[in-house]
Amino acid sequence: MKSYLIKAEKERNVRTDNISSVLLENFKKNVLPIQINLEIGCGHGHWLTSFAQEHPNSLYVGIDLRTKRIDKAKSKAKKRILDNILFMKAEAVEFIGALNDNFFIHNTYLMYPDPWPKARHHKRRLFNDRFLELLLCVTTSDSKLYFKTDHQNYYNWAKDSVARNSNWNFCNSDWPHHQKSYFQKMLPDNYDFCIQKCIKD
Ligand SMILES: C[S@@+](CC[C@H](N)C(=O)[O-])C[C@H]1O[C@@H](n2cnc3c(N)ncnc32)[C@H](O)[C@@H]1O
């Protein structure tokens, strides 16, 4: 294997180990396995902080790629003295891959993910067939995923992925928390859906 690939692999392993140890350290008061609710691309943590404050008996994790956004999110949670929420810098697919038998995701929230509008960039969209398969392995049997976007083409793309997947069904759940996310305040149009994991015998 080429040396730069070996280096990248090692760096990925370090990040993955770090994700599970930070989670374990942060939620050490809880009995294993631990159920978390995950917001992917949480930005400044505006929405998730307010949601976690309303539900002190559930655990929340917000992840984002941008360090500054995570730093702001952490300081919001600290000001409110919340011990049921953790913000960390992580990439979504890596984070999901790093979860081991100690952690399960109950609900997942994905609001205004980058839409990658050009057709040649659609393959960079986070919500796709592979993403739904990845989530299957780490979610509880009653897991739901809430998706919201201002981009109609991405909305249809995401719905098509769900329609192709026999393990997730659309459901009629109301949006679980009505505080607007940072992007929602700026973007007037939005389209959303909720899907639920199919329970198979
Ligand atoms: C358009 S912003 C939306 C922020 C927030 N959800 C809101 O509604 O205000 C998209 C966010 O997703 C983050 N992001 C993009 N791809 C990601 C990935 N693969 N893993 C984690 N975060 C990601 C970006 O850094 C950015 O903060």
Image (cartoon, rainbow, N blue to C red):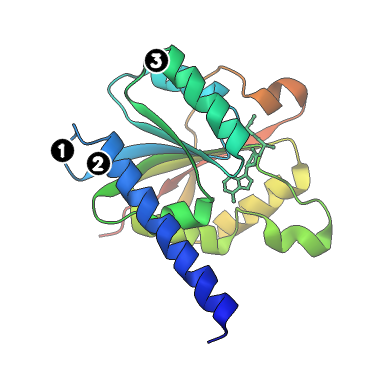
Question: What residue sits right under mark 1 in the picture?
Answer: 31
Which corner quadrant of the image does residue 99 belong to? bottom left
102 or 3, which is in the foreground?
A: 3
Q: Residue furthest right?
A: 118
Please state which amino acid type lies under the numbered disc 3. Glu
Residue matched to label 3: 54
Along the line of sight, which residue is nearer the eye, 59 or 145?
A: 59
In the picture of the structure, the residue carrying the numbered disc 2 is 34
Say what amino acid the circle numbered 1 marks: Val
The mark lying in front, picked from 1 and 3, is 1
Residue 39, position in %: x, y?
49, 37
Secondary structure category for the residue under label 3 = helix
Q: CA distance from mark 3 to mark 2?
A: 19 Å
Q: Are marks 1 and 2 in contact (CB under 8 Å)?
A: yes
Of the residues shown, which amino acid type is indicated by label 2? Ile
Question: Where is residue 167 shown, x and y percent of the image?
Answer: 43, 58
Residue at 47%, 50% (x, y): give it: 169
Q: Mark 1–mark 3 contact, CB under 8 Å?
A: no
From this viewpoint, is residue 45 visible? no
**Residue 52, above or below 102:** above
Q: Earlier in the sequence, mark 1 or mark 3?
A: 1
How far apart are the alpha carbons under marks 1 and 3?
A: 22 Å
Q: Is residue 186 above or below residue 27?
A: above
